[in-house]
Image (tube, coloured by chain):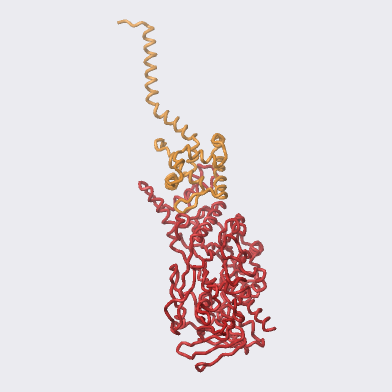
Amino acid sequence: MAYSRRAVIFGGAALAALAGGAYTLYRLPNYLNSCLRRRAKRDLSVRIGMLIGHRDSAAVIGERYLALAERPSERSPHALTAAMGRDMQIDLGTLDALGDAKLGATIARQITADFEHERVVSISGWLLSRTEARICALAALTWPGLFTK
Amino acid sequence: MPDKSAIDADVCIVGAGAAGIGIAREFINTPTQVAVLEGGGLEFDQRTQSLYEGENIGLETFPVDANRLRFFGGTTNHWAGHSRTLDAIDFEQLDALPMSGWPISKADLEPYYRRAEYVCELSSVDDQDIDGLTSRLKLAALELDVTRLQSVVYKQSPPTRFGHVYRDELERAANVRVYLNANALELQCNVEGTVVEGVDVACIDGPRLRARANMFVLATGGIENARILLLSNKPNPAGLGNASDLVGRYFQDHILLRPAAEIIFSKMGVDLSLYHELSPLEGGDVFSVLAPSEGLIRSEGIGNFRLHIIRPQRMSALGEGSLRAIKSAVRERRFASARAHLRNIMSDLDGIAELTYKCIANAPIPDENHVLAAQLHLVLQPMPDPDSRVTLSGTRDLLGQRRVAVNWQVRERDLANARRAVELAALEVGRLGLGRAFAAILDDASRWPSNLEAGRHHCGTTRMSTDPSNGVVDGDCLVHGVSNLYVAGSSVFPTIGYANPTLTIVALALRIADTIKRRLNF
């Protein structure tokens, strides 16, 4: 059977496309992973939660905070972040636009203000700033267990 | 002395503790003949001490006799020496503090405080001037929110054992005679009960006597003063000075929590030596404690209190236990030490103002064995309560006299005040960035922590008031309705503030001495 030159060119291109596509498909999970990880890092809830490097410690404190009877409305990253924004009287978009160092400094000032204005919680007898308890809760909720690289 | 002998004097002082010795000394080398009756000897004796035994029918705190000493010098024989004047607000009538308000002001007592400080061998530094103190000692005070808490000056007596320090002076005094092992049984009055004519006295296994005088001072301590008045039941069966049923009532003692809270520091090198070390200044040692501001007392109606900052050897089981409880709520996880979690959190968060969050998240934490920690000890003024009281029990002592029954009570309001005091300290610890505080009372505000103690400062049982229906003695400590009987000691305190009572006891005693001198036309 004779193939036309056009058929060969188009067929080759199709195969190449398929091969390229197949290669792309093969590499898609890693690519998606890195895209999603970058997306997760940019999420404000995650960024705030990542202020604490000792994630297991945060989980212990944070889960106890979330178990407090008066906190049912805060059992999601979004609710926690929104609550923090309200206390700080800062728009979440503005907060998210801060670089990491400035975000940390803003949070630190808020913790001091919490003690000044008695926005505190007792976690099994330890008096903590409400903000730091929420950060612990965020860390516990947003630890990206799937994205471990 | 032979049985049924008489002791005659111009002034008869019953009791040779801080108050009794303080008054007696004021009459040395005067024309006044003074007799001092001391139930014990020069040294501790168990049989004599047994006369202080009684029933504790209130809170389980301490045996009734264990905090009082019945020998020459009285309870100063085991006095710790902590001293401070009462605050001006402690003398005021406050709406939030029932039955508050002394009939005298701090200004009335101020000249006597200065003299009392000399008697108690204290520093002469002004205990109202913390700034002057820190400046002279070159020690830093915490930068507290003074609308909440403030650092205040506290003084440390050597401590002065009155029986030891003033024995020679009294022995040499020709006009003062101290009678040892002379236990006062009751006061005998005229038929109307308006004049004390004598004191019946007994020695264990010895003679019974009567002491006669023109003026009498009852100075046997916060519990025994009430007991003797209740035992003096002729002509009034309810007791001498007890027309208003107040003798023995409003018994108050400082409420102690030791520790009340524990702090773990998030930064190294916090200098608290002003608070937990003694510094010599102007003839005595001084240190500082935390106390509420006057504004806070007025706005919140909280009882006055003080907090000592103590550096412990190690973290107590309380804080560690709490963190274990947190850990146990997360059963799948396994952690070496729950306390480390809180410190990890603090090391992360407290430093984020200084470093990028990544650097701090990876920062090493202090070794657990070297973590800095401190305890807070709380001393709290109780709310006066008429049902917290000293009465007579059905049992009798070696001399046949009815013993006391002590019913010390604290109330929900006291618990709320204790919690608030601890909370204020924890708030300041956090606000100052020092670290974080743990307190059992912050975890469960519905009951007292298991380490609730009494301060062993027995007060209020013969309270002062210008109104006989509200007090046993008047502003001069003269018993209402009795023209020649004064009561000296902490039993006259209507409210007790947070300061240890000894300095105020001595100040009031010196004031009584001056009052008696005026009556004797000195």
Examine the rendered structure and indicate whether residue A28 appears above or below residue B122.
Answer: above
Examine the rendered structure and indicate whether residue B368 appears above or below residue B356.
Answer: below
Where in the figure is residue B106, as x and y percent of width and height? 65, 68
The answer to which image quadrant residue B137 occupies is bottom right
Examine the rendered structure and indicate whether residue A34 appears above or below residue B316.
Answer: above
Horizontal arrangement in the rendering, residue B169 relative to residue B56 (left or right) = right
The answer to whether residue A57 is seen in the rendering is no
Q: Residue furthest right?
A: B522
Q: Residue furthest bottom?
A: B2
Where in the figure is residue B483, as x and y percent of width and height? 62, 80
The answer to whether residue B88 is seen in the rendering is yes
Q: Residue furthest left?
A: A1
Where in the figure is residue B199, as x and y percent of width and height? 54, 85
**Number of numbered discs present?**
0
Where in the figure is residue B380, as x and y percent of width and height? 53, 63
Chain A rendering hue: orange
Quarter of the image where the C terminus of chain B is located: bottom right
Towards the viewer: A43 or B471:
B471
Towards the viewer: B276 or B111:
B111
**Which of the chains is red?**
B
> In percent of the image, x 37 and y 21: which residue is there?
A22
